[in-house]
Amino acid sequence: MNDFEKLRRQMVETQIITRGISDKKVIDAMLKIPREKFIEKKFYNETYNDHPLPIEEGQTISQPYIVALMTELLNLTGDEKVLEIGTGSGYQTAILAEIVKEVYSVERYSILFNKARKTLGELGYKNIFLFNLDGTEGLKEHSPFDRIIVTAASDKIPQPLVEQLKENGKLIIPIGDRFSQNLIVADKIKGKLEIKNYGGVTFVTLIGKYGVSE
């Protein structure tokens, strides 16, 4: 076992399981994915620490616990087609791809899109489809989606994402302003969203036509 494997196991035991994450599929994915592949070398000594880390374009790779929490809250069975808004480093994308049938992930920044495509390609994923577009518009031509995960904060749920979510589907998104956000899970029941609040989080801003204007 190398140092990273040891740290990964430690991270899962101390940051994930002790905080109540119990979905075996999520735990197994967190144990498997080499987080160090998604991080700049200068942050290697912080790879498995309990906080987010900076990546290019002023974005971040989320704290491991938040990645695990958001994945668990999607209540995945394994058959889903998932839309991810904000590929970022590609780490959350890889976690999802370990569990579900297909992941469609959208990243607005070309530099992040190209880097994530390279990393995920090197890891051999065949069920991830990446797009360099405005994520707030979703991917209408590939909809509907069983689950939608948004990894940036908006003051509202972008309407295209509501429309592209399947009936009885689930959407997770941080909602709020730059300083105060709540993690929201929305279930689409009879065309309407039923919303649950899972408490305070901090994410970068969701920029785009249906997000927060620049």
Image (cartoon, rainbow, N blue to C red):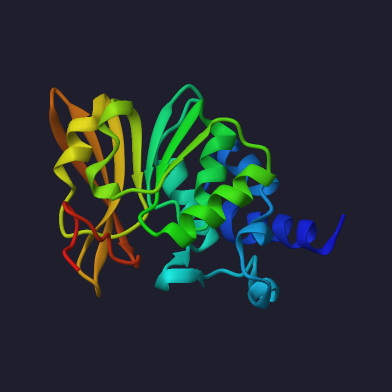
Q: Position of residue 137 (x, y in %)?
A: 23, 44
Residue 187 picture quarter:
top left
Residue drawn at x 24%, y 72% is 178
Left-right relation of 127 to 106: right
Q: Position of residue 156 (x, y in %)?
A: 15, 53
Residue drawn at x 35%, y 65% is 203
Residue 123 picture quarter:
top right
Left-right relation of 84 to 161: right
Q: Position of residue 128 (x, y in %)?
A: 52, 36
Above or below, 207 against 131 in this view is below
User: What is the number of callouts on the image?
Assistant: 0
Residue drawn at x 66%, y 48% is 33
Quadrant holding the C terminus:
bottom left
**From where the camera sits, is residue 162 visible?**
yes
Quadrant holding the N terminus:
bottom right
Residue drawn at x 61%, y 65% is 39
Above or below, 190 against 57 in this view is above
